[in-house]
Amino acid sequence: MRFTCERSILLKEIAIAQEIISSKNVISIYSNIFLEADNDTLFIKATDTKVNFQTKVPVTVEESGSITVFGEKFLGILNSCPEGEVIFDQKETIITIKSSVKKANWQLKSIAAEKFPEFAVSTVESFDLPIRDFKDMIEQTIFAVSDDETRYFMNGVFFEKAEDKIIMVATDGRRLAYIAKTADSAIKDFSGIIVPPKILNILAKRAGDEGPVSISVTDKTIFIKFGSYSLSSVLLEGQFPNYRRVIPENLGNSCSINRLDTLDALRRVSLLVEQKSRRVYLGLAPGSMAVYSEDSELGTAREEIPCKYDGPEVSIALNYHYLEEPFKAMDEEDIVIKFGDTTKAIIVQPVPERDLFHIIMPMQLD
């Protein structure tokens, strides 16, 4: 096999493939990236046994063939290559990689392509969503996924089609993120599935904002296609919590604040947050909100910002990350915080409201 390709084009795709790979064992096929050159196209595959990735790029093929190459070193070589074309030449089990503009070359041992696992293909009908909407759904929820491996059913994003909406939900038990988008009536309802964050993170980072994303769901796998990319992932098993039961109702108070002003205040005040608790306080009074923190060993920080609020003076204690992350994910100018009893869950929503909210459990005031 022999082909030539622009270094920048190949580097981008190999970097994504390497994100998939979890094994660092040189002799493992799962540490390798599959390459197949044919008809002036290079097909690229990578897997960690649960998440599969494949794409293709244009290359100049002089000799067709297929091979696998150790991903970590291949990516390192491409990173160190100067801009320009890269020549890839395979003879038996040895791969030679050359720069076309410098007298530099590398030789890597390889594993035969036949040892690379076959990828499953979807056997059910797919549906399309605008990729901009799907990315928005991921970005509004993925940070709330639990990392507690003993509660594995919360280690992913819940995804379902219910009535006329596509819904995503994530929770770690102390906060919950919910977003819904209007779904085309042609999309069939499907039972809720739990999608591991790895495949969603790759899409959110790598997909553009134009065009559709094609999705199909089976009992155990989700398949996602966009542009030249095809991804699939084994779904998480288990029963996701009934998120509808924890949505607070009849919250009698609301406070409207500027999103960027609040983020700036949180950033400054968090300099003196106790690192173990990460507790910040919101002190609400008519027309203003104080954001403050206390570190028993170092000192205190406080900042006041204007707000639209005409209720009683109250204080709410929150983990500042739980407030900061949804504020960063949203892009509206103003945010509303709704609350009742200050010891119970609050709701954070954009202004104007849409099918998006974040539920946060307060902390003890002291």
Image (cartoon, rainbow, N blue to C red):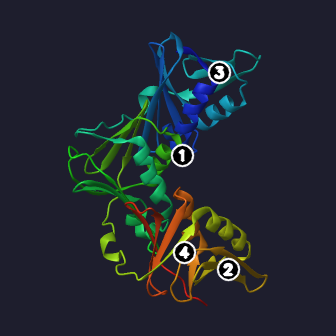
Residue 79: which quarter of the image? top right
Q: Residue at x 62, y 68 (%)?
A: 262
Task: State the SS at label 1.
Answer: loop
**Amino acid found under the numbered disc labelled 4:** Lys
43 and 203: which one is in front?
A: 203
Residue identifier under label 2: 292
Residue identifier under label 4: 308
**Amino acid found under the numbered disc labelled 3:** Ile
**Would you say the residues marked 4 and 2 are in contact, meaning their CB atoms lie under 8 Å apart?**
no
Which callout, 1 or 4, points to the residue nearer the camera?
Answer: 4
Residue identifier under label 1: 23
Residue 128 image position (x, y, % from top left)? 31, 40
- Badge 3 local density, few (<14 within 10 Å), some, or many (20+)? many
Which callout, 4 or 2, points to the residue nearer the camera?
Answer: 4
Residue 353 placement, left or right of 286: left
- Of the two numbered discs 3 and 4 on the same chain, state the one appearing first in sequence: 3
Task: State the SS at label 3.
Answer: strand
**Would you say the residues marked 1 and 4 are in contact, meaning their CB atoms lie under 8 Å apart?**
no
Which callout, 3 or 2, points to the residue nearer the camera?
Answer: 2
Marks counted in the figure total: 4
Residue 193 image position (x, y, % from top left)? 31, 56
Which residue ends up furthest to the top in the rendered image? Answer: 62
Mark 3 to mark 2: distance in Å? Answer: 56 Å
- Badge 1 local density, few (<14 within 10 Å), some, or many (20+)? some
Mark 1 to mark 3: distance in Å? Answer: 23 Å
- Badge 4 local density, few (<14 within 10 Å), some, or many (20+)? some
> Which circle marks residue 97 in the picture?
3
- Of the two numbered discs 1 and 3 on the same chain, state the one appearing first in sequence: 1
Give the quadrant of the C terminus.
bottom right
Residue 157 image position (x, y, % from top left)? 40, 58
